[in-house]
Image (cartoon, rainbow, N blue to C red):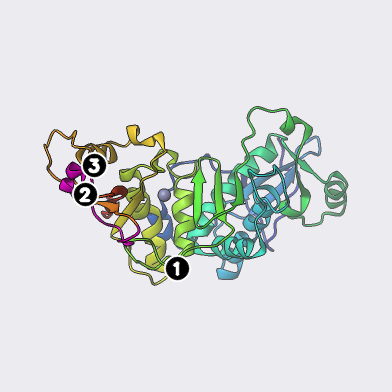
Amino acid sequence: MVAAQVWADIPGDAGEIRPPDVATRPVDLISELAKPWQAGGAIALYATADGEPRAGRLASPPRDADEELARREEHFALARKINLVTVPAVPGIALPLDQAQIDLLRRFALSDAGAVWFREVADDTLRLFNQGYLEYDEPSWRAAVAGGESLRLSALLTGRLSEAGLFSQEVALFRIFAFEGTGAMAAAASVRLGLRGFRCRFPLSDELVDPQAVLSHEFGHTRYGDPRSAGLSHGEALTVARYENPVRLRNGYPPRGVYYLRIDASSPTFSRDALLARALAWWHGRDDGQGAPPPHGLYCDCGESQPDPRECRFDQNVSNGSGCVPRWLAIEVRPPEP
Ligand SMILES: [Zn+2]
């Protein structure tokens, strides 16, 4: 590939265009936030010898906060085109985001922590584009090349996969979409936001919810962070320490000290969570410790006459008439190892 000409969004000399960084994951958010800038190099388009468009990044750091902001805006514009579900797609699975959710995501993308995550999402887009998997507006590209005009990648992409992309096994688009419910969830290739919004306070701990910190937490469960951490007691506590508390501190919220893992009675994930398995074994009287309390707090729902969850007591279970059911496991959040 030959860099025939550069169309950068920034004036002056464009410098050298590099291909998108090879992903170094999981993202180390704490060290990223300690750096002066978070968005990475400006995205630049160039033409191959055949006249095909390719995308890379300029090595130079932004000159000032406005330039950094422009890079963050472009990353969000790319995400909006490629990753955000904004129209009904697959009914019942990926609901479209509403305007309040899109606004929240934009504010997050323009923040320091969000800039780190959306840079990672954009790098995926650059790689897919350079592989020919994303459809682009060919007349616009030819006009820009002929006229030597500046063109943003977010304006060049149509938002659809190319024919090659549609039939490729390599394309696993990261998606952000809505679900019927409260709060947020994540999987390796998606972040989902509840259409009923966020709670103001976390259950049990009563700590205030910072929606941006929750978004960073959820990104921590995706392929840009550690996808094996979701739903596991130690993984969740580590996610709070590495990805949620750094954002809370920046936004003026105290760090969370305890993570309460909600116990879903129908979920089969218990078997891969040693701590939760031990707590439930204790509750069911099968623990080696013969009635010794679990290593972290186990909280029970004890029926409608006692609406507040309370610490489970082994003797309640032995008597078997308490009506108490384990609902939450409390895990201490420790600062991450340096
Ligand atoms: Zn989580």
The residue beneath circle 1 is 200
Confirm or deny contact between disc 2 and disc 3 (CB under 8 A): yes
- Ligand 1 has an atom within 8 Å of the beta carbon of the residue at disc 2: no
Image x and y of residue 89, in percent: 71, 45
Sequence order check, earlier mark of 2 and 1: 1
Label 2 element class: loop
Tell me: residue 86, above or below residue 169: below
Q: Is residue 70 magenta?
A: no
Tell me: residue 167, above or below residue 20: above
Label 1 element class: loop
Residue drawn where x is 29% and y is 54% of the image: 302
**Is 225 or 197 nearer to us in this picture?**
197
The residue beneath circle 2 is 296
Q: Amino acid at mark 2?
A: His
Image x and y of residue 154, in percent: 72, 53
The residue beneath circle 3 is 279
Determine whether, in the image, residue 112 is placed left or right of residue 175.
left
Q: How far is mark 3 from mark 1, CA to CA?
A: 29 Å
